[in-house]
Image (cartoon, rainbow, N blue to C red):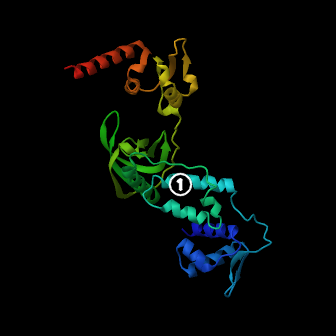
């Protein structure tokens, strides 16, 4: 878009003392004539740009102009570039890499050793996830409906939504949209979406409430868990629940207390510790876990 290009040109001029029209044309992948028109538009907007003709000519901002020569501080620019690198890690294209080059034009230290925050949002599902993200982005940009097959804990179903936001939360990607069958806004996990199709049907964007992403809203809890863990499990409890989730017992074991959100997930989680965890409460889940273990034992009996 033109406004994006104008901001980009202004950013380059603020970071470099002087540039040429061919340089800007190459950076922004447009013709030299387009750059000349953009410079005229910037002048009309009140930016005092100086152009010099000839072999030593170029384009620059008037030397004594009182505007800050950088729109962003080094720290702010580094934060932006870290975020863009994170987006590139889940994207199948080099779109954000090219944008980083434009943003950092004339400031090579942004692109080299001074970067100390690296974000990688890729996952085991990168090959299937990147095309989904690109398709959903297109649907949001163009205001087109999305249809897909969705796997939920309750049932499997065909859905049609008006997509509004792509969200990265709880180590996964989601799309927030208006579900045509539920007549309400819903959050859909990309890994559960299959056969995604971009519809020819467009929609008028309605007022969109931001999703309530608080953990207690999405994962309401309600299961008070008390369990004993072997001391060798401490690192994992700290990683998943923090240091305040247990108290060390005199025998070295860890008495664990937490709210859990889902019975099936709790049982599955405890089984990953094998014989290093013992569920104490709730009593009814302890009995259910025992029954599961007995059924597992039967499957392995000769």
Kindly identify the residue that appears in the image at 54 percent across and 48 percent down: 119
Which residue is at a point 59% across and 79% down the rendered structure image? 22
Q: Position of residue 167 (x, y in %)?
A: 49, 46
Q: How many marks?
A: 1
The residue at 49%/62% (across/down) is 95
Q: Position of residue 196 (x, y in %)?
A: 34, 51
Q: Quadrant of the N terminus?
A: bottom right
Q: From the viewer's perspective, is residue 163 above or below residue 9? A: above
Q: Is residue 199 left or right of residue 11?
A: left
Residue closer to the observer: 203 or 267:
267
Most distant residue in the bottom direction: 54
Asked if 27 appears above or below 226 in the picture, the reply is below
Look at the image and tell me whether residue 203 can be seen: no
Mark 1 nearby-residue class (10 Å; few <14, some 14–19, many ≥20): many
Read off the residue under disc 1. Answer: 85
Please state, as top left, top right, bottom left or bottom right, where the C terminus lies in the image: top left
Foreground residue among 203 and 218: 218
- The location of residue 281, given as percent across then percent down, is 44, 14
Secondary structure category for the residue under label 1? helix
Q: Say whether residue 94 is left or right of residue 7.
A: left
Vertical placement of 167 versus 92: above or below? above
- Is residue 76 visible in the rendered image? The answer is yes
User: Could you tell me residue 8's position as x and y percent?
Assistant: 61, 67
Q: Residue furthest left?
A: 302
């Amino acid at each position: 878009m033109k406004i994006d290009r104008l901001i980009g040109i202004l950013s380059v001029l603020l970071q470099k003392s002087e540039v040429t029209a061919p340089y800007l044309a190459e950076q922004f992948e447009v013709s030299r004539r387009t750059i000349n028109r953009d410079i005229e538009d910037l002048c009309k907007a009140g930016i005092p740009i100086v152009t010099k003709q000839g072999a030593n000519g170029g384009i620059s901002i008037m030397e004594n102009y009182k505007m800050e020569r950088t729109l962003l501080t080094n720290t702010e620019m580094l934060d932006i570039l870290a975020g863009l690198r994170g987006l590139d890690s889940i994207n199948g294209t080099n779109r954000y890499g090219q944008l980083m080059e434009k943003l950092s034009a004339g400031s090579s230290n942004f692109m080299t050793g001074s970067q100390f925050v690296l974000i990688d949002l890729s996952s085991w599902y990168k090959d299937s996830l990147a095309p989904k993200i690109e398709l959903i982005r297109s649907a949001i940009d163009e205001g087109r409906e999305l249809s897909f097959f969705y796997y939920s804990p309750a049932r499997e179903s065909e859905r049609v939504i008006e997509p509004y936001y792509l969200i990265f939360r709880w180590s996964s990607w989601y799309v927030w949209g208006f579900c045509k069958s539920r007549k309400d806004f819903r959050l859909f996990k990309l890994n559960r979406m299959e056969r995604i199709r971009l519809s020819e049907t467009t929609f008028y964007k309605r007022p969109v409430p931001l999703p309530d992403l608080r953990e207690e809203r999405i994962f309401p809890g309600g299961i008070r868990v008390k369990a004993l863990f072997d001391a060798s499990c401490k690192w994992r409890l700290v990683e998943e629940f923090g240091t305040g989730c247990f108290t060390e017992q005199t025998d070295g074991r860890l008495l664990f207390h937490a709210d859990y959100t889902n019975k099936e997930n709790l049982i599955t989680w405890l089984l990953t510790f094998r014989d290093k965890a013992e569920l104490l409460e709730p009593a009814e889940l302890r009995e259910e876990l025992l029954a599961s273990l007995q059924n597992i034992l039967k499957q392995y009996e000769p």
